[in-house]
Image (cartoon, coloured by chain):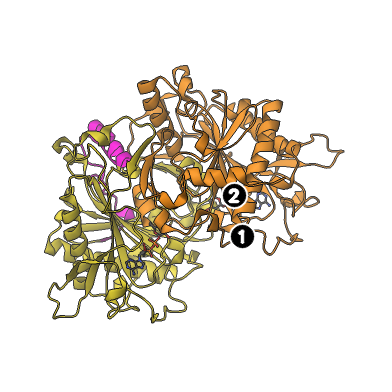
Chain colours: A orange, B yellow
Amino acid sequence: MAEASRTSEARRDAVFGRWVVFSPARSRRPTDLKSHNPTNNPSPAPKPSCPFCAGRESECAPQIFRVPPEDALPWRIRVIENLYPALRRDVEPPEGSGGEADAEEVPGELALSGFGFHDVVIETPSHEVRLWDLEGEGVRDVLLAYAARARQLGEHPAVKYVQVFKNHGASAGASMAHSHSQMLGTPFVPPSVKSRFNCMKEVFDKSGNCSLCEISSKDILISETPNFSAIVPFAASYPFEIWIIPRQHLSYFHEIDQDKALDLGSLLKLMLQKLSKQLNDPPFNFMIHSTPFGLSSSCLPYAHWFVQIVPQLSVIGGFELGSGCYINPVFPEDAAKILRELDCS
Amino acid sequence: MAEASRTSEARRDAVFGRWVVFSPARSRRPTDLKSHNPTNNPSPAPKPSCPFCAGRESECAPQIFRVPPEDALPWRIRVIENLYPALRRDVEPPEGSGGEADAEEVPGELALSGFGFHDVVIETPSHEVRLWDLEGEGVRDVLLAYAARARQLGEHPAVKYVQVFKNHGASAGASMAHSHSQMLGTPFVPPSVKSRFNCMKEVFDKSGNCSLCEISSKDILISETPNFSAIVPFAASYPFEIWIIPRQHLSYFHEIDQDKALDLGSLLKLMLQKLSKQLNDPPFNFMIHSTPFGLSSSCLPYAHWFVQIVPQLSVIGGFELGSGCYINPVFPEDAAKILRELDCS
Ligand SMILES: Nc1ncnc2c1ncn2[C@@H]1O[C@H](COP(=O)(O)OP(=O)(O)O[C@H]2O[C@H](CO)[C@@H](O)[C@H](O)[C@H]2O)[C@@H](O)[C@H]1O
Ligand SMILES: Nc1ncnc2c1ncn2[C@@H]1O[C@H](COP(=O)(O)OP(=O)(O)O[C@H]2O[C@H](CO)[C@@H](O)[C@H](O)[C@H]2O)[C@@H](O)[C@H]1O
C-alpha cells in the first residue's frame, strides 16, 4: 500500500492487548525517520577506565561464569553480578514464595523484601565491538549464556521470572558504552508479563489459538529462517519495532538449543544491522519475553516466547504515560517493507 | 526513617497493580537528585514565530473556545484543534461504537478507523509564563477549560475516554516551549485505564473499599487542602512522582466545580513550584486519570479520579520496557518528606 494513501488508524495487538494509534500525519515520510542521537558518532573511544574491558576484570563485581569456561583461554563472554543491583541476592527471599499462588493473589498495596538477582552479561572483551559486529556464532554464544544463566536462576524457588534485556545508547538508558546486556531475576511476575498472559489467554479461550502462532501476514514480514520469523508487529508501539518469534510454539526461551540459538543469533544480527543502517545507528533496547517459572501446564498452549527490539527514535509524552496507548507515525507494513528490502550484505 | 537504613524493597500499588523496585543503591542521596536537562536554563526566549503567542492566532488550527469568551477582551486561555492530530475528528467513527460492549470485548488483533479528537489547550498568551507562574485562579481556569472540553467530548457517542496531559520540557516530549497541554478523546478505553479499573475492582471486591479512599499514611503526604491530598504514592514508579487525589470519592474529573478547581489549582501550582525548586526545573508530564464515559454504575464505587505528576529525571531502559516494572532509586517516604518540608513561599 502506498504511504500516501494512509490515514490514521487505531490498532490493538493480540499479545499485550495494547492500543496503538498510527498517525502518519505526525511525521515525515517513514524513510526520512532517522535517529537524532546516533550512538556511533563519534565512535565510542575505548575508555581506559572501562571495567568491562579485557584486563580490568578485577574492577567488576564477582563473575558468575565465563565463555569459554577454561581460565587458560581468553574469555569471549562474561556473566557477572551487577555492582549496583536493583534487587539483591543477599537479602531474605519474600516469605511464602515458591508457590504459584502469590502470582495470582488479589492486588492491593504490598511490599516485599528487595530479594532478587541482577546480573550483567559482557558480550565481548573489546570496547569497540557491538553485538552485531560479532559473527552469528558469537551472537549465538551470547544467547546461550543468557539461557544458561536463566536456567540457573529458575532453580531458585523464589525467582518467578527472568527479564533479559539490552540497552544500547544513552537515550535507551545505557550508562556503559561497552557492549553488554542485563538479566533480572524477580520474586514476582512483572506487570507486563501478567497482562501479556491475560491477553493471550483471552485470545486462546476465544479462538483456541496462540496469538503468536496465528501471525501469518506477509505484509509485516521482514525475514524468515528455518526456526524464526522477524516481523514488524501489526500494532507496533514504536516506529520500526521488530519482533523475532520462534515459528514453532515454544514457551521458554531458556530451553533454546545450539542450532536454534545460531539461527536466532544470525537473524538478530541481521535485524540490528538493518536498524543501524536504516535509522542511523539509533539507540535501542531489546527484551526477551519468556514465560514465568512454574506456570501451570494448562497455560502453556498460549505461552510463546519472543524477542522485541525497540529503536528509540522519539521521546514518550504524557499521552503514552497516562493512557498506555502509543502514537506511532509509521505503519508496520511500511516499516516492514523498508526493512525487508534493505540490503545489508 | 533515615535514608541510610534503607535497603531494596519491591512494592505493588493498589491502583495500577504495578510492581516497582526501590533501590537506593542505584543513586546518590535523594536530595542530590537533580535534573540534568533543566528547562529554565537558558530561559526560553519568546520565539517570534511561536503560533501559541498572542497575536498569532491565525497560524493555529481552528479554535474550539477561549477564556474569556468575549472577543472584545484579550484571551487568557485558548482551546484549539491540534494541527497534527493523532486521531481525526473528520473520519467516520468506528462502527458499532457507542455501546459499552466493545470496551469489554475479547482481545485479538483489531483495527479501528483513526477517529477521535486531539486538542491543544494554550494556557497563557505569554511565551515566558509557565503554568505555575499563574495565580491559583489562573490555574483554576485552565482546569475548568479541560473540564468544559471533556464534557463536550463526552457528548459524542463514539468517545470512550478523554486523556488530559501536559508535556513540559523536551525530555518530557514537548515540541512546543509555550505553556500548553493536550487532550485526546479516544474511541476505545486505553490500556492503562483498563488495567487501572481491573486492579481497583479486585481491591474493591476483596476489601469493599476504593484503593484511593484507603490511602491514609502520613509518611507519604506532602500537603493537604480541604478537598485534595498531594502524596508521593506508596509504589511510585518515578522518583518524586506526585499524585493529587480528591479527598471525597469522586469518579469524573470533568464534573469538578469552581471551588474545587480553585483548591486543586492552588495545590497543583504549589506542587509544580516544589518540583521546580527541588529538582532544578525538571522536564515533567502530568496526566489526569479519570473514568471512561458510560461506565456502568456498579463500577463507580471504585472509580476515583486523580492527577499524576511525573518529573523526568532519568531514561527508561529495557527492564522497564520489557517488564512494566520500574526501578526507583528514591523511597516515597523520603521524597514526600523532602517535598513536604520544602518552603516555596
Ligand atoms: N564495575 C562494575 N561491575 C559490575 N557491574 C557494573 C560495574 N559498573 C557498572 N556496572 C553495572 O552495569 C550496568 C550497565 O547497565 P546499562 O548501561 O544497560 O544501564 P543501567 O542499568 O545503568 O540503567 C538503565 O537501565 C535500567 C534498567 O532498565 C533503568 O532503570 C535505568 O533508568 C537505565 O538508565 C549498570 O546497571 C551498572 O550498575
Ligand atoms: N500552529 C499550531 N496549531 C495547532 N497545534 C499545533 C500548532 N503547532 C503545533 N501544534 C501542536 O501542538 C502540540 C504540542 O504538543 P507537545 O509539545 O506537548 O508535544 P507533541 O504532541 O509534539 O509530542 C509529544 O507528546 C506526544 C503525546 O504524548 C508523544 O506522542 C510525542 O512522542 C511527544 O514528543 C503538538 O502536538 C503539535 O502538533
Residue B288 makes an appearance in the image: yes
Outermost residue to the right = A72
Write the residue at 20% across / 55% down.
B150
Residue type highlighted by circle 2: Asn
Camera-nearest residue between A341 and B22: A341
Q: Is residue B41 above or below residue A171?
A: below
Instruction: Classify mark 2 as within 8 Å of ligand 1 or not, answering yes or no.
Output: yes
Over which residues does the magenta segment extend? B194-223
Q: Chain of mark 2?
A: A
Q: Quadrant of residue B245?
A: bottom left
Q: Is B81 part of what is drawn in magenta?
A: no
Disc with the residue nearer the chain's start (2 vs 1): 1
Q: Quadrant of ligand 2?
A: bottom left
Of residues B219 and B241, the one drawn nearer to the viewer in this rendering? B241
> Where A161 sits versus B249, above or below?
above
Q: Residues within 10 Å of mark 1 (few under 14, many from 20)?
A: some
Please state the horizontal and vertical placement of residue A62, each as a whole percent of the image. 70, 43
**Which disc number belongs to residue A38?**
1
x 49%, y 64%: residue: B33
